Image: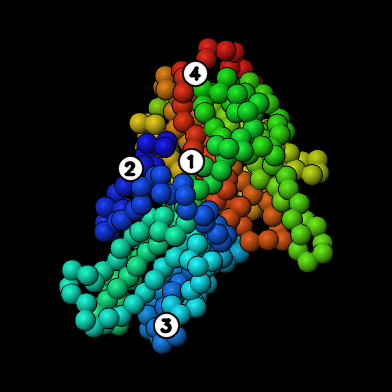
Amino acid sequence: MRYVQAAVIAGILALFFLTSCDEEQSRRLPRHSGKSGEIMLVMGDELWHGPVGDSLRGVLEAFVPLLPQAEPRFSLLRFRLDQMSNLLKQHRNIVELEIDESLDEEDAGVKVIKDKWASHQLVIRARARSEGELIEFISRDFERVCSLIDRTEIERLQKRYEKLNNPEISQLIREKFGIEMRIPTDTEIAKEKNNFIWIKRERTKYKGNTPHEITQGFFIFRYPYRGAESLSEEELLAARDSVLKLHVPGPDPGTYMTTEYRFPPYSNSLNFNGSYAMRTTGLWRVENYFMGGPFTCLTTTSPDGNYVVSISGFVFAPNFPKREFIREVGAVIEGARFVMEDSNSDQNE
């Protein structure tokens, strides 16, 4: 998967003029600051409170689809250029916007600079000769800027999980499914069957002085491949619901996890390790019980073509925004890759 990710980010970067320091210089830079999903905007008051600011907020604060409550795509901080201290310049994602009537045509546009003031940092500079031109750049280029920042946040998480990996669980996944996954250290096995693993991650997060439990989970399972229809959204969701009903009970008897179809899931195809795959995002709920949250799922075929393999993750955090929790889950799933042929072990549930 990392090779597909590299191709995606290379394609995005190719759309912009890119500069970057070398790897040795990057290692000498301080670590980037700020929270995941946060963007620091550097622009004057007049731009921020005018049509340029409105255009920016329309793109950067668009709601993330298929979350239980409305959440913006990014969290925005805004500073003027004269307020930018050396410490602020170390922020993970910086977007600078400027109007300069004296700019040459070739100097106007959007430029991406990697690792300018901090390691693994993105600095995006949008320079224009007029307000209208700057708004045009935002309309034309900033969806791709958003995709670049999203991808970079995923890669930052994946680098973290490479260092903070649970080796025992990773080895179990490798042996059972032939899949290499970096699983956070604070995870444990909730349930294991021949063709199914449920991995859970539970943390305590405070809101005010009150502790709340945050649950993230991963399901990895497989079942026989029966043809191209096995990877249709309808079939893969039906199979997922069947597996979850069997293996993921709710708090009370007769309750179990399933898909929330009142808000239809969304699926798109992608290349996974050279094979066709479907990525599905949506909402889950517990049948006959008041629980739910977002999920993301990647479904493909095993290298030998005999099985459908699904890697699914979910979040339960009723007292908190879900955007960054589901990003963490997605980073784990997107970092998976096949490393061996599926074994010929007994496939019975």
Tell me the quadrant of the picture where the C terminus can be found.
top right
Residue at 60% x, 28% y is 170
Give the crowd class for mark 1: few <14, some 14-19, many >=20 residues within 10 Å.
Answer: many
Residue 89 visible in the snapshot: yes
- Residue 290 location (% of width, % of height): 74, 54
Front: mark 2 or 4 = 2
Q: Which residue is mark 2?
A: 7
Gap in angstroms between the C-alphas marked 2 and 1: 14 Å
Q: Which residue is mark 3?
A: 44
Q: Which residue is mark 4?
A: 342
Gap in angstroms between the C-alphas marked 4 and 3: 57 Å
Q: Quadrant of residue 181?
A: top right
Question: From this viewpoint, which residue is outermost toward the left?
Answer: 105
102 up-or-down from 159: above or below: below
Give the crowd class for mark 3: few <14, some 14-19, many >=20 residues within 10 Å.
Answer: some
Gap in angstroms between the C-alphas marked 3 and 2: 35 Å
Q: Which residue is mark 1?
A: 334
Give the crowd class for mark 4: few <14, some 14-19, many >=20 residues within 10 Å.
Answer: some
